[in-house]
Image: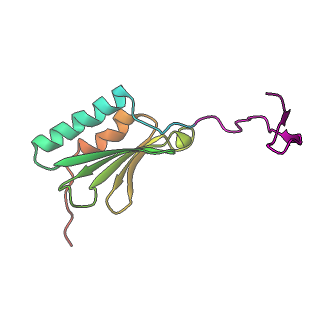
């Protein structure tokens, strides 16, 4: 079909209809996800923490702007930690970050292995 085609209506009169060309202004945007190497690094830490009895459940979200790996002590609670990948921040602070349940960014960087090293340290509760 061209931009202008004639269509015969039922009453015998010809009408001209203008068809707009199909232009996709934005390319298809797929959700952000963790690749195999990233997921392997995250699951290695997760497996160790489950064996220690600290973590019990996880959830993975693939959104338009970021991918999130959430860690739970119990599945009915809010996540203890969120490991996020935001490619939009790759040239600035780094695409990867570990965020606590309070929203505090514990570590951020360009390399996921370095960011995940925060879980290598034994975290202690400081009493007042």
Q: Main secondary structure of the magenta part?
A: loop
Which residue is at a point 17% across and 56% down the rendered structure image? 74
Relative image position of residue 75 (x, y in whole percent) = 20, 55
Q: Kindly indicate the quadrant of the structure image that contains residue 91.
A: top right
Q: Position of residue 93 (x, y in %)?
A: 51, 44
Q: Residue furthest front?
A: 11
Give the residue displayed 39% in from the left and 29% down from the top: 35
User: Where residue 124 sits: x, y (%)?
Assistant: 19, 57
Q: Residue furthest bottom?
A: 128
In terms of image quadrants, where is residue 104? bottom left
Left or right, 50 with reference to 8: left
How many numbered discs? 0
Magenta segment includes 73: no
Instruction: Tell me, yes or no, whether the highlighted magenta stretch contains residue 26.
Output: yes
Residue drawn 18% across the image and 54% down it: 73
Nearer to us in this view, 70 or 102: 70
Front in this rendered view, residue 92 or 121:
92
Residue 92 screen position, x and y as percent: 56, 43
- Left/right placement of residue 92 relative to residue 55 reads right
Figure quadrant of residue 105: bottom left
**Residues shaded magenta:** 1-28
The colour scheme applied to this rendered structure is rainbow
Side (left or right) of 51 relative to 17: left
Q: Split into 4 quadrants, where in the image is the N terminus?
A: top right
Q: Quadrant of the C terminus?
A: bottom left
Q: Is residue 2 left or right of residue 106?
A: right
Above or below: residue 5 compared with residue 67: above
Say which residue appears at 21% left-offset and 60% top-offset.
76
């Amino acid at each position: 079909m061209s931009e202008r085609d004639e269509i015969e209506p039922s009453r015998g009169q010809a009408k001209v209809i203008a068809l707009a060309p199909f232009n996709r202004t934005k390319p298809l945007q797929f959700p952000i996800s963790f690749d195999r190497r990233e997921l392997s690094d995250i699951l290695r830490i997760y497996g160790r923490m489950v064996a220690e009895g600290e973590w019990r459940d996880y959830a993975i979200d693939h959104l338009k702007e970021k991918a999130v790996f959430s860690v739970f002590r119990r599945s009915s609670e809010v996540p203890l930690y969120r490991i996020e990948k935001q490619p939009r921040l790759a040239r600035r602070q780094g695409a990867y970050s570990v965020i606590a349940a309070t929203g505090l960014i514990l570590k951020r960087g360009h390399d996921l292995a370095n960011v995940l090293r925060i879980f290598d340290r034994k975290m202690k509760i400081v009493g007042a």
